[in-house]
């Protein structure tokens, strides 16, 4: 299993030097900016209610209240319900796994994992459990699939409570941050899931070890609203980008 952990980034001395220069630039440019702006004619502001961005789309008769958003239009209606129903269906040719995908971890019971069980899927489980507790994790829907003798899939939907922290986006960004590393990551920035703006998928370099079958791994990460998705594929044969991308697109479409 690849190591996955929360790691803070350091700020170097160069950053401080650039920041100091930026402050000087702001001070020097302020007076010039005021002068230029004062000589310009006033610019009309755009209307606040722009086409296609208001709800309802057309003005209602006086006294009539707007109709509530449908479940299809309101993502919170979907994610506040049974989160397990948003898991992607089993890919064709697969079945529910008979053993955990992650070595030593717990099989999802009734498609749920507790925060402690989920944290155990990480190398630094105590650190991960603390991270999720501090970021107000709510629940984890999970399912493991298998195909043939060695191909396995793990799908996780990690939901955070709506509060002062952006748990889903922060956790997805944190996990993506090290995926470009060559030691524990995939070694590159990954490929964007089209239309998502934040989801990416990765193919890891093959892991060869004497006396063992080759280990191939692919991973997809992203979020929508308060739910972060994390998908893994493991196999002893090469995994194509289209395989992991298709799963990511399907999962994103259900959130």
Image: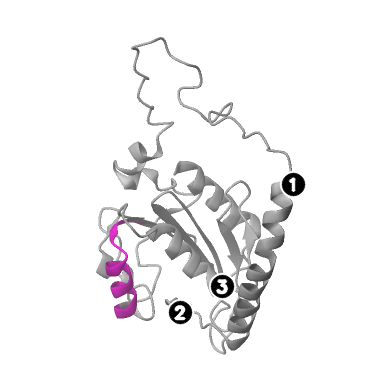
In the figure, is residue 94 to the left or right of 243? left
Is 140 above or below relative to 81? below
Is 49 above or below relative to 8? above
Return the disc, 1 or 2, that comes first in the chain's sequence.
2
- The 10 Å Cα crowd at callout 3, few under 14, some 14 to 19, many 20 or more, is many
Identified at 33% across, 76% down, the residue is 104
Name the one closer to the observer, 25 or 102.
25
Residue 154 location (% of width, % of height): 43, 61
Residue position for label 2: 8
Q: Nearer the viewer, mark 1 or mark 3?
A: 1
Alpha carbons under labels 1 and 2: distance apart: 47 Å
Viewport quadrant of the C terminus: top left
Does the magenta segment cover residue 132?
Answer: yes
**Magenta-highlighted residues:** 126-142
Residue position for label 3: 179
Identified at 59% across, 26% down, the residue is 51
């Amino acid at each position: 299993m690849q190591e996955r952990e929360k790691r803070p980034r350091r700020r170097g001395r160069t950053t401080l030097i650039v920041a100091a220069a930026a402050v000087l630039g702001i001070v020097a440019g302020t007076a010039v900016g005021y002068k230029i702006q004062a000589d310009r004619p006033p610019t009309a502001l755009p209307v606040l209610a722009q086409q296609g961005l208001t709800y309802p789309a057309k003005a209602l008769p006086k006294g009539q209240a707007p109709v509530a958003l449908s479940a299809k239009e309101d993502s919170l209606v979907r994610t506040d319900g049974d989160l397990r129903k948003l898991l992607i269906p089993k890919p064709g040719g697969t079945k529910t796994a008979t053993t955990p995908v992650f070595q030593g971890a717990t099989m999802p019971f009734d498609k749920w994992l507790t925060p402690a069980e989920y944290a155990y899927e990480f190398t630094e489980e105590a650190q991960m459990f603390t991270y999720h507790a501090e970021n107000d994790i709510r629940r984890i829907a999970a399912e493991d699939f298998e195909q043939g003798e060695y191909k396995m899939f793990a799908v996780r939907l990690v939901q955070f409570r709506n509060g002062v922290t952006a748990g889903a986006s922060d956790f997805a960004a944190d996990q993506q941050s090290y995926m470009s590393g060559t030691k524990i990551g995939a070694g590159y920035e990954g490929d964007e899931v089209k239309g998502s703006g934040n989801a990416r998928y990765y193919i890891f370099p093959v892991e060869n070890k004497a006396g063992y079958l080759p280990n191939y791994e692919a991973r997809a990460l992203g979020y929508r609203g308060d739910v972060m998705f994390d998908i893994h594929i493991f196999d002893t044969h090469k995994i194509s980008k289209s395989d992991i991308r298709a799963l990511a697109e399907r999962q994103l479409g259900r959130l």
